[in-house]
Amino acid sequence: MSSSSAEEAGSHAGTSDTLSDGGDAGEASAIVAFEAGAAAAAAERHKSGAAMDETLWGALPEDLQDRILAWLPFPAFARACTVCRRWNAVMYSQSFLEMYRRIPPPLPCFLMFEAKDRSMCAVFNPASELWHRIPFTFFHYETKFPCAAAGGLLCFCGVSAYPTLSVCNPLTRCWRELPPMLHKRFPNLVGMVVDPVTRGYKIVVAGDYYEDNVRTEVYDSTTNCWRLTGNHLPIANYTLRNAFCNGFHFWVTRDPYGVIAFNMEHGVWSVVRAPMPSFLSSPHLVGCHTRLLMVGGLKKHTIPKNIRIWELEQNSMNWAEVARMPHTLCKRFLRDSRNGDFMCVGFNNLICLTSYKCPHALMYDFSKRSWRWVASCPLLTDIEDYRSTIGFPFNPRLDASV
């Protein structure tokens, strides 16, 4: 494969605003190509004469080529897959995937859908600070609604009266429908977790829009079966704002605000007995390694005046403030917001916040204790109500199997 062909493929990918298949190789592939964030840099290197030695590259053994491909950031890997058929097919090789699993995982990304048009999602890459669009043309998105994400996989729920769940990997474009749940239901809550060692996943579903007192079920991909758990949801009024931390799925309840937890190992619900901050608005939960964080606004005379981050102290069972948004940033961020509401997606050390009609998103880095502006999600620009967007933390993984 010549270096000029590789550069040409990268430049071609960079002209597209949407992730799409690339040429003949793309037609044979189940991979979705990220838009080329590094196209400009590649063009500069080409102009400066820093082109790759075609003879040297062509003489590299295939296993060494695979090792280089495995280390590529995914946007670059996706562009490389459009260069030739062998590189396009390498992601199906078991030896390549074994090598890929030994590579340190990339930074987590943030994935967002617009609820009314699920044909496209947007993924924010913190490493490049770019948004990438992924089309869902491979998937029956018209009849399914995104409800959970974990380990590079997305879970969708059908929109019929008694739907089934589906799981897909948007990078490999593989998907499958799960077996029917034991109890016919339209679940209120759905949570997902992937085992980092076995890569198997579990999905918990709870509640039913049409019936009360329905027992919780858990699906295990290693057995391809659902099982009933021991108790019901402890509180009926809850939101869909969810986080996974220390083996528990957590959800925010409302009227009044609170938190409930589901123990994935033992299949038991509990109420988190920690008093919520006064005058709280729009609370969101974030799992930061072993710490459970809550991001929310504080209201004064029904108008949110600032945004803060709290950590749940396990010993005292109190929410302790650990960070607050600077006043000037908060004023700009909430300037055009309706009722001061915002959307928040977080994972590990990074938290991304978007607000109605705000031209940029805000990123908080918990490890650096710093705030910074980033480009706003491209799906938010024409949406009348930002609350119709759905966000998840997302780890792009080629080896995430459905």
Image (cartoon, rainbow, N blue to C red):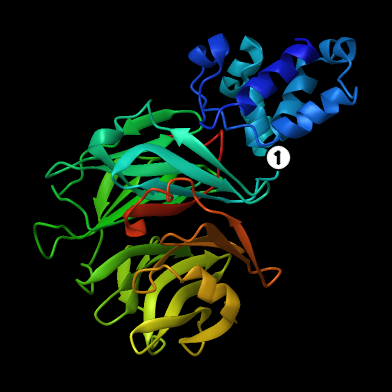
Q: Where is residue 319 drawn, in percent x and y?
A: 48, 85
Where is residue 44, by image quadrant?
Answer: top right
- Report crowding for label 1: few under 14, some 14 to 19, many 20 or more residues within 10 A (C-alpha): few
- Front residue of 63/325: it is 325
In the picture, measured across the screen, residue 349 lies left or right of residue 59, that is left
Rendered view: 229 above or below 39? below
What SS does tag 1 mark?
loop
Q: Where is residue 240 drawn, in percent x and y?
A: 32, 62
Q: Where is residue 331 drawn, in percent x and y?
A: 52, 76
Q: How many marks?
A: 1
Rendered view: 241 above or below 150? below
Residue 324 appears anywhere in the view? no
Determine the residue positioned at 47% across, 35% down: 134
Residue 359 appears anywhere in the view? yes
Determine the residue positioned at 77% across, 29% down: 42
- Front residue of 23/49: it is 49
Determine the residue positioned at 68% across, 23% down: 10
Rendered view: 44 above or below 186? above
Q: Where is residue 115 drawn, in percent x and y?
A: 31, 47
> What kind of residue is marked 1?
Ile
- Front residue of 197/90: it is 90
Q: Considering the image in quadrants, where does the C terminus appear?
A: top left
In the picture, measured across the screen, residue 43 lies left or right of residue 293, that is right
- Front residue of 8/95: it is 8
Where is residue 143, by image quadrant?
Answer: top left
Q: Considering the image in quadrants, where does the N terminus appear?
A: top right
Say which residue label 1 marks. 103
